[in-house]
Structures are given as C-alpha cells and as structure tokens.
Amino acid sequence: MSGEQASVLVVDDDREMADVVCDVLREAGYRAAGASQGSEALALVRQECPDVLISDLRMSGLSGHQLQLELKRSAPNLPVIIITAFGSIQTAVESMKLGAFDYITKPFSNEELLLVVSRALENRSLHQEVRRLRGELARSYGLPNIIAANPRMMALLEMLKQVADSPATVLLTGESGTGKDLLARALHFQSSRRDSPFVPINCAAIPENLIESELFGHIRGAFTDARQGRTGLFVAASGGTLFLDEIGEMPMGLQAKLLRVIEDKQVRPVGATEETPVDVRIVAATNADLDRLMEQRRFRSDLYYRLSTLTLAVPPLRDRPEDIPLLLKHFLSRASAEAGKTPPAIEPEALACLMRYRWPGNVRELHNVLQSAVIMCRDGKLTVRDLPTLATGTGTLPKLTIADAVDRRLSLERLEREYVRAILGLVNGNKRAAAAILRIDRKTLYRKLEELEPGEQPPPQNKADLDKAE
C-alpha cells in the first residue's frame, strides 16, 4: 500500500504534538488526521476506517490502553502504534501484549516514525491477503461445494453442519476415495475455527520413527541429526483443526501418546521436559475396520472411543448412483477448463459404462478417469474408446494381453499402471489383497503408487492414488 493510498489517524491530547506527527506523515504522502481524545478517535475510526492508528499512551480521558481495548472489539484488524516516553517502556510492552503492532519512544526521528508506519501497513496488507485467501479456501471447500443428491449424503452433510462448532473429535469412516479429506476440510471451514489453520497428516505416509516428531515436535539434540528444534503439527494447528488421515495405520506405541495429548490438551516435544498447551480440534479418518484392528490388538480401544465421539460414515459411490451424473458434469467441466477445452458431450454408450461401473476407487477414481477422458476425446465427444479399459467393463478384471499392449503402444510405465489399477479394482481396493497378488508388501505398494504419480497426493494415500494413471 503506497503512502498516497494509506490513511493514518494520530491520537494525542497534546494537539501540537499530534499536528507535528500529521505534518511528517503528509510530507511522506500519507493522508493524516488528528484527534485529541480517545473518544474522538473511536468516532473517526468508525467514520473514516484508517489504515493505521498512532496513539499516545498517556492521555486524559480515555488512555492509550483503554483505547486499544475498545479498538480490539470494534476494529480488531487495525494496526496500532503506541507512542511512549522512554521511562514507560514496560507499559508499552504491556500494550504489545494487548495487540499493539509496535511502539516508538519519545523523542523519535521522522525516519523512525515513517519506518514503523511503513512496516505496519505491510503487515496489514499481509493480513488482508491471508484473510482473502482463507475466504477463497472457505468458498472452495465449504459444504455448499460438496456435490450430493443421494439421501444418505445429504443427511451426512446436514450432520456436518450440526457438529461443525462442537469441540468433540470426529471420526470419518469409509472406503478410499469417498471424499473424507474433502469432508474434513468442509467441517473445518464450516466451523468458527475457519480463520485458523487446517493441518492434515497422513499417518500411513510417515515412517514410524518420524511420526512422533512430526506430530509433537522435538527440541535441538533430542535425537541424532536433530540440529535444531522443530514445531510439531499439533502446535502448527493451534486454534484450528488437525486432520489425522489413515488413523488406523498409526503405530501402537504412538497411540497412547496421542490419546494423552487429546485428553490433556498439552504436547511434549520429543526430548523436552515441559509441556505446551494446545487448542486443536481433532478430525480423524480411516478406511480400515477399526473394530477388527482392536480385536487384533493393533488399535487401542481407549483411543478409538475417544476419537469416535462423533462418527460419520461416508457411503461408497456405488451406493449413491444419484450423485454420479452431478459429479460427471462437475468433473468434466473442471477437467475441460484445465485442458483448455470445451466440455465434451458424453455419448450414451460411454455414459452407460460410467453409470454401470462399480467405482472401487470411488469419487477420486471417477475424477481421474474423466481427467484422462477429456484429454483423449476428440471432436467434442466422449466415447467408450476414451475411457480406461477397467471402466468399460462391469468392475471385473479386464482382458489385457501383451498383444493389446503392443497394439495400443503402451509404455512399460503405463502398462504397470493399468495392471496395478486393475488388480486393485478386482479386490475392491483392498491394498493387502492387492499386495499379495502382486507379491509385494504393502509399504512397497504405497511407494509404487507414489512413484507412478509423484507429487499428486502425499504418499501413500490409498489405492485411488493409482487412478491418476489414466
């Protein structure tokens, strides 16, 4: 914000001092106005909406501190600069605790005054940009942007509205690709925590020896290579929401520590002796059967009961056919815009395939299939030949021979993508079963999914990451 655009309100019961400060600001190109009392300043703030306020600390009537408290209620985003005498620096520090941007001590130079005002304006611009971006995120991830016509999904969205401002933990269950991440974000942006961070972590994606440090942080020297301290995700999400995706994959040893943090609302960084209070809303998600994991003693029952205070089950796409036409229209429009194309018309045979297919990868698979189809289609029409082979069948393993691959001029990478995706479709997305058929362990399967499509999702999300292949 340039000086010509910015306005500054100067508050001082010493009228001569206020005039001098205003003159300095005007010479620098700012619009400046003066007020001799705190009550007058409050009225001018409401009328003129200045960009910065400069206030003397000691004034007759409403003091600088009292003015700050009033402004905190009526204009919380207005940066306040306090003017104080050298002997009152401690009082100025108290003003900083109340939210003042900065303070300057008398006597001060013109350069010092203008530097502090410039920094306050830069800070205000940054905060405005952050609020704008958060507003865009709220509009992008808010509940109104979740596409649904199915009664079960509509009931689920209504439940999300009801629990959005509850401090209780929420557990989202459902198959991979059903949109649990999107629902978690919608829950956050529907809540009063929307202006604070939403911090996701995939519990399956981080090695067991690092996840404790990721969540809780660590101090310098806590372990080998800990050359400096690190803030954990609990602290990073302070005031907002921490989304624990794939919670069923969390190591048993860490589950007890997570339970303690949730109950005590305090975290202890690795290697530290003191705990830090945190104010975080926990949302967890899983595609695993936690009841079975508890029977197998792979998931703590006390943590489950703490996480499942509010449990929301997300239905798979095959159980919500009413949503498919709406999702088709949405994803085709978005994919076409990204590809610089006009949304294609879907030929009846292709539409029948898409409606008939069981979608083991759920909404994420549908999205990825349509992204590929938009790129492949010609003449503004989406036909069966533009769809991946798996989607043109009925959910069973397609016939893919070496001759087919040669005829289609498939690269080894694309052939592997199709084969692994077909195997996952055959076993309805069960990664354990897919890994057994492929004769690799689950960790290798996770790594392979990320290698096939690096950078699209934090590895390993789930089987649906593979669907970016087409």
Image: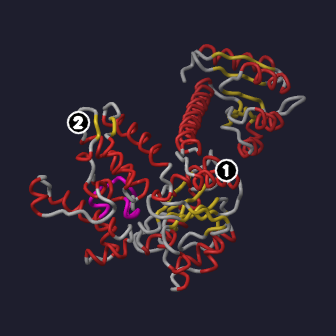
The quarter of the displayed image where residue 121 is located:
top right
Depth check, front residue: 170 or 379: 379
* Picture layout, residue 379 above or below residue 360: above
Q: Is residue 453 magenta?
A: yes
- Which residue is tagged 1? 161
What secondary structure is marked by label 2? loop
Q: Position of residue 353 (x, y in %)?
A: 33, 51
Residue interval drawn in magenta? 449-464
Relative to 359, is 258 on the left or the right? right
Q: Residue at x 33, y 45 (%)?
A: 371
What distance separates the C-alpha of mark 1 from that of mark 2? Answer: 42 Å
Image quadrant containing the N terminus: top right
Q: Given contact means CB atoms under 8 Å apart, are the residues at marks 1 and 2 in contact?
A: no
Label whose residue precedes the other's in the sequence (1 or 2): 1
Q: Secondary structure at mark 1?
A: helix
For label 1, count other residues whose C-alpha is less than 10 Å away and answer few (under 14), some (14-19) or many (20+): some
Q: Amino acid at mark 1?
A: Lys
Q: Residue at x 62, y 53 (%)?
A: 240
Q: Is residue 333 above or below residue 312?
A: above
On residue 420, the disc is: none
Q: Position of residue 61 (x, y in %)?
A: 90, 29
Question: Residue 242, position in %: x, y?
Answer: 57, 59
* Colouring convention used in this rendered image of the protein: secondary structure
Which residue corresponds to mark 2? 378
Q: Residue at the location (64% across, 79% down)?
A: 302
Q: Quarter-wise, where is residue 51 in the image?
A: top right
